[in-house]
Amino acid sequence: MSNRSRFGGLLATIAIAATACSGGATAAPASQGAASQAGTALTGSLTVWESYGSGAGTEPDAFKAIVASVKAANPGLTVNVQDVKFDDLFKNFELDAASGGGPDLFIAPNDSLGKEARAKLFLPLDDKLAGKLGNDSQISIDGSKVDGKLYMVPESLKAVAMFYDGATVTKVPTTTAELLAAVKDGSIKLGVNQASYHNFGWWGAFGGKLMDASGKCVADQAGVADSYKYLADLKAAGATFYKKYDDVATAFKTGKVNVLIDGPWATGGYLTTLPKLGVAPMPAGPAGPSQPLTGVDGWYINANSKNADLAVAFALQMVAPANEALFVKAGHIPADTTVTIADPITLKFAEAVKTGFPRPQAAQLDNFWGNFDNALNSVIDKGTDPVQATKDACTAMNTANKIP
């Protein structure tokens, strides 16, 4: 699963029922084989949301296989899975949960973790997860917290990097200057997803910073405008910008472009048509390495759930090492450090995760996305001066956050 811009797709409901058991969380004696981490089989009914059907990769198959594994280990468990379009996931959850409804739990990145936790829509999990995350990386645990409290069962980490088709790209650019030159001479056909998430890494390459320690936007002070100018220069040189993630992903799969910035979730889908698929870090810029956002995917428990204990136990089984190994094959970088990554492409993304910029959970981030998406669109679509666009976005963000 990914981020704000990569998804499309339709809402579909998949009922995965191990038995005709009704709701309510109870624990039965431990079953044979891979039962829960607590040593008991799970009994009851859960409604689960996910958005893997919206992605470009093979995550849906992995997710179904993991659910099937949990189902086989827990014959008293009924799971009703709804595949929700990612663009609607957080919005729908907020609407449903605010009125006392919504799923028992859902899996998603920590895009809206801070906002929804502060709205008390998630169940705090410190007590329920005590002693159960000992193998998880610190960055995954920190990325599951808001104001020091756990609100998510960590599943995986992600950061974008540069995919390329090794069949047509003979020299992989390592700097922004090299990439621009390759686009100009036609040796690279670059596709760009025109969204803040995918392009955030360029900020670090040009010395840009979003907020200071107080949460005030300082993007207008240095670097960010330079990164926007660089993107405009890439477009002028021949790069193709896409408003929809599905469109740029399709262009890459079909050879219309041979380089793009994307995340590990897409690996499996790209390999279906690009057997010489390669991955490298986003090129470094004049101020240093690119710093894409490092996010954490995980399981959120609805504060309204009547089956909270069952939901937590289910989430822990879904991220158990044997099950998480299936997600690794779909490109996930596991939160559990005991799960082995063998694939060289996924290993490259694991490096990107380590050097990326951890996604902030400050309340002020809520007013980042729309304002800076507008700034990026204004520069790319209208030719607005990058300095002015950045200044306007930063001012709007601070105004919305009531910061002078």
Image: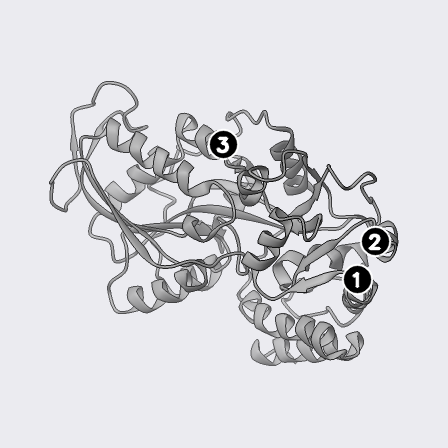
Q: Is residue 154 visible?
A: no
Q: Do the residues labelled 1 and 3 touch (CB within 8 Å)?
A: no
**Furthest residue in direction top, as rendered:** 32
Amino acid type, callout 1 = Gly
Q: Quadrant of residue 248?
A: bottom right
Q: Is 47 left or right of 197, judged from the image as shown?
A: left
Q: How dense is the environment of label 1, judged by Cα within 10 Å: few (below 14), some, or many (20 and up)?
A: some
Q: Label 1: state its secondary structure.
A: loop
Q: Mark number for residue 186?
A: 2
- Please tell me how crowded label 2 is: few (under 14), some (14-19), or many (20+) other residues with Cα within 10 Å: few
Amino acid type of the residue that numbered disc 2 sits on in the rendered structure: Gly
Q: Which residue is drawn at 76% across and 67% down?
A: 228
Residue 245 placement (x, y as % from top left):
57, 58
Pointers 1 and 2 in contact (C-beta within 8 Å): yes
Quarter location, residue 229? bottom right
Q: Nearer the viewer, mark 1 or mark 3?
A: 1
Residue indicated by mark 1: 238
For the point 25% across and 42% down, the residue is 309
Residue 83 placement, left or right of 280: left
Residue 307 higher or lower than 392, as above or below: above
For marks 1 and 2 on the same chain, the one whose residue lies earlier in the sequence? 2
Mark 3 sits on what residue? Answer: 336
- How far across and down, in percent of the image, does residue 223 sit? 80, 64
Image quadrant where one finds the C terminus: bottom right
- The amino acid type found where label 3 is placed reads Asp
Residue at mark 3 to residue at mark 2: CA–CA distance: 42 Å
- Foreground pick, 364 / 230: 230
Mark 1–mark 2 distance (CA, rounded to whole Å): 8 Å
**For the residue labelled by badge 3, is the local secondary structure a helix, a strand or a loop?**
loop
